[in-house]
Amino acid sequence: MNRLGLALAVMLLFDGTASASQQGQVVSSSWKAADKCAKQAQVAYPDYSAESNAKRDTNLKACLNGGNLAPRQLPSQPPAR
């Protein structure tokens, strides 16, 4: 009897966590689309020169705007000494 109760408790515990919410699915698909934009920009401008970095950022921003996705934050600049 004790094992049956434990098995039932485990099933109930995992039953509620198995499916994602609709909001979670939307966020996940948005992240995937944004990652796809970043990958396309990296493939288009693979060099790490200042010119390629600027073109890559422009390409990424255009792709994100075209897909109505949130812009990516630029890395924070180190404090001036």
Image (cartoon, rainbow, N blue to C red):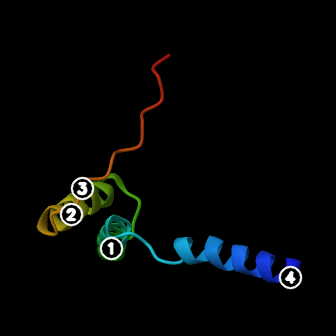
- Identity of the residue furthest to the top in this view: 81
**Which comes before the other along the chain, label 2 or label 3?**
2
Label 4, label 2: how far apart the Cα atoms are: 56 Å
Residue type at the position of mark 4: Met
Residue 17: percent from left, percent from top:
55, 71
User: Label 2: which residue?
Assistant: 64
Q: Which mark is residue 70?
A: 3
**Which comes before the other along the chain, label 4 or label 1?**
4
Residue type at the position of mark 3: Ala
Q: Which mark is residue 29?
A: 1
Question: Vertical placement of 20 versus 50: above or below?
Answer: below
How busy is the neighbourhood of tag 1: few (under 14 within 10 Å), some, or many (20 plus)? few
Mark 2 vs mark 3, foreground winner is: 3
Residue type at the position of mark 1: Ser
| Residue at the (50%, 16%) spot, across then down | 81
Where disc 4 sits, the SS reads loop
Drawn side of residue 81 relative to residue 10, left or right? left
**Pointer 4 and pointer 1: residues touching (CB < 8 Å)?**
no
User: Label 4: which residue?
Assistant: 1
**Pointer 2 and pointer 3: residues touching (CB < 8 Å)?**
yes
How busy is the neighbourhood of tag 2: few (under 14 within 10 Å), some, or many (20 plus)? many
Mark 3 vs mark 1, foreground winner is: 1
**Pointer 1 and pointer 2: residues touching (CB < 8 Å)?**
no
Residue type at the position of mark 2: Leu
**Which comes before the other along the chain, label 4 or label 2?**
4
| Residue at the (41%, 43%) spot, across then down | 75
Label 3, label 4: how far apart the Cα atoms are: 53 Å
**Which comes before the other along the chain, label 3 or label 1?**
1
**Which comes before the other along the chain, label 1 or label 2?**
1
